[in-house]
Image (cartoon, grey):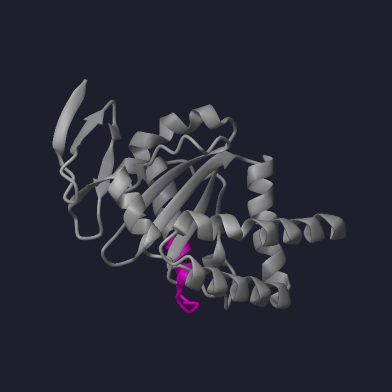
Amino acid sequence: MHEYVGTCNACGTTIYCENGFLNGELSENNTLICFSCDERNLKNRVQLSPYQSNWPETFAKEKNAILHNLGDPTIPIEHIGSTSVPNLQAKPIIDILFGVENLDEFTHYIHPLSQAGYAYVPKPELRTRRFFKKDTGTSGTFHLHICEWNSSEWDEKITFRDYLRVNPQSAKAYESLKKQLAEAYREERSVYTKEKGPFIQSILNLAYKKG
């Protein structure tokens, strides 16, 4: 059953809710926007920010809020992405890794996570994780990634983070690459992300070789 919610502020597409799934989301100025328009907006925002010393604290507070809302303190939750690496420039987005035993379980978390401000964003191209997003007017943007705990998806994200944390030269090389790509693909977020792939894989190869 479709429940009418409103229309996209950018293109006028009807936005509805079906079984708890919203085919759009609230933009940063609290207007409805469809996923297509939101994706185009995101592509126009490849902009790095200087490292903020409060990013780890922001993550810690958000983690506690999520666990409190879900009522299960045993859920593995980790801070990943560039904001988790000290002194690394990054898009001002806190990336959160959320572990489950089986990826099919993610549907059980859609409603409770919505109570914590997270909207599930279907991305058919993501086969080993599920994506949720939370925008706030004060504490910034949070991206939450659900994947199977101790899967290759989980392990690679943690390994990459940990390697950069203890190898500042590699972190600086990554930052330099990110700056180049942000300049070259400022309006093409998906290309920016794709072009980081070879460097990330090279770091993983080094980390696993040392391990």
Q: Nearer the viewer, residue 92 or 111?
A: 92
- The residue at the point 56 percent across, 73 percent down is 180
In the picture shown, does residue 49 fall above or below 98? below
Q: Nearer the viewer, residue 193 or 112?
A: 193
Query: In which quadrant is the C terminus drawn?
Result: bottom right
Q: Quadrant of residue 203?
A: bottom right
Image check: 147 left or right of 121? Answer: right
Residue 101 painted magenta: no
Q: Nearer the viewer, residue 58 or 182?
A: 182
Residue 49 painted magenta: yes
Image check: 188 left or right of 77? Answer: left
The stretch of residues the image draws in magenta is 48-61
- The residue at the point 31 percent across, 51 percent down is 38
Q: Position of residue 114 (x, y in %)?
A: 32, 42
Image check: 83 left or right of 206? Answer: left
Q: Position of residue 97 (x, y in %)?
A: 54, 50
Q: Position of residue 138 (x, y in %)?
A: 28, 67
